[in-house]
Amino acid sequence: MSDNTTSTTFKTPLSVVLIGCGRVSEKHLKAISKLKFLELKAVVDVNPESAKNLLRSVKGFANVKQYSDYKQAIDEIHPAIVSVTVPSGLHYQIAKYAMEHGSNLLLEKPMTMSVSEARDIYELSQKTGLKIAMGHIYRYLPIVGLIRQDIAKGTFGKVTHGSIYVRWGHGEDYYSSAAWRGTWKSDGGALMNQTIHAIDLLIWLMGSEPEEASAMIAKRLRNIEAEDLGMAVLRLENGALAQIEGTTATIPSKHTAEFSVFCENGQLTMGLDSGKPHIAVYKRKDNGKTKKLNGYYIRKQLKEGGIFSFKCALNPHLGIYKDLGEAILENKAPIADAYAGYSSVDTLMGIYKSAKEGHPVTLPLEENFNSIDMTGYFD
């Protein structure tokens, strides 16, 4: 499923208002600075010093307006794009207000903290024709989209299963840096915060929606309200199985994430290890021999996307902004669109619901489930 193709006409340069000046916001500014069809009009943060420090961190934004009230910024500027980088628990109210006032969205993950709110935002995008680009950064890494196309075409045969692990260690200093971190209301745990875009990528690559989730979560090391370790198995509509591990209870200096998809006649493994990317794509030929296809996909990516697509490996937000701008101007769906945002929230809430109730749950969820429903789970 994808976004509605009815859209308001927008002209370049597309005006941008960035709401939230925290950890990820500098990546947004760096991306905007590289794209001539975008113009940053304002940044918004309840802490004026955070806004000032952000604008100082990237050249060329010294004269950008600063606001403490996002509604005032949207009402005065009427931006083509509102970028939302605030704590997850605030996503819904800001996203809804922005869309109701005519702005497209770049929305960091997760879309919302409840199924009903995510569905509401998705349906609002369908009704208005406004575009939503989700911060599912892994979809924008080079080669990934090409491999997905070939998996969907059956180049590798039937998809059998897939797996991901996200071992994104954070110490107590990370969680104590802001009161909302690790809370069920505003953040969720390792699965919701650190692993959701990895889950999105795995399902996207495997080419089928989840129909059942079985999960367990635990709190092993971190002094937080939500989980620092979660494991789940998803059954997809095409019969394939997906295995998930997400944790922050690992060494903070050794961030690792890995994705694997296994097919009848091939397999893909890719990931990051302490910031260093790796990828291996194999296909079994008709004669029974196995061939590594890394070089083939690199050459094809260079031919189709140029060197720009490889720059997105260093800052995937560059790819997200470029894709969103093109989606607005050409009236097409972004790569990680509104449905992707809704579906990933539904999957995560299904995982949490399964952990809470101690049995598999059917997806999509028929009734609303909110991260707040997990409150007291570890008491």
Image (tube, grey):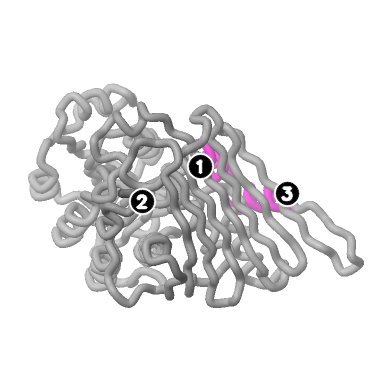
Q: Which residues are magenta?
A: 294-314
Q: Callout 1: 10 Å neighbours few (<14), some, many (20+)?
A: some
Residue at mark 2:
109
Residue identified by numbered label 1 = 312
- Rendered position, 96 above or below 168: below
Q: Look at 21% across and 29% down and name the residue there.
A: 51
Question: What residue do we see at 76% from left, 56% from top?
Answer: 282
Estimate the x, y position of residue 299 in percent, counting from the top left. Answer: 70, 48
Judge whether residue 265 can be spotted in this image.
Answer: yes
**Viewed as shown, does residue 102 lie left or right of 4?**
left
Q: Amino acid at mark 3?
A: Asn
Q: Mark 1: which secondary structure? A: loop
The residue that label 3 is drawn on is 294
- In this rendering, the answer to whether 135 lies above or below 272 is below
Residue 119, x across and y down, in percent: 28, 69
- On the picture, is 347 further left or further right than 146? left
Which one is closest to the eye, mark 1 or mark 2? 2
- Tell me which residue sits at (13%, 44%) in the image: 70
Q: Amino acid at mark 1?
A: Cys
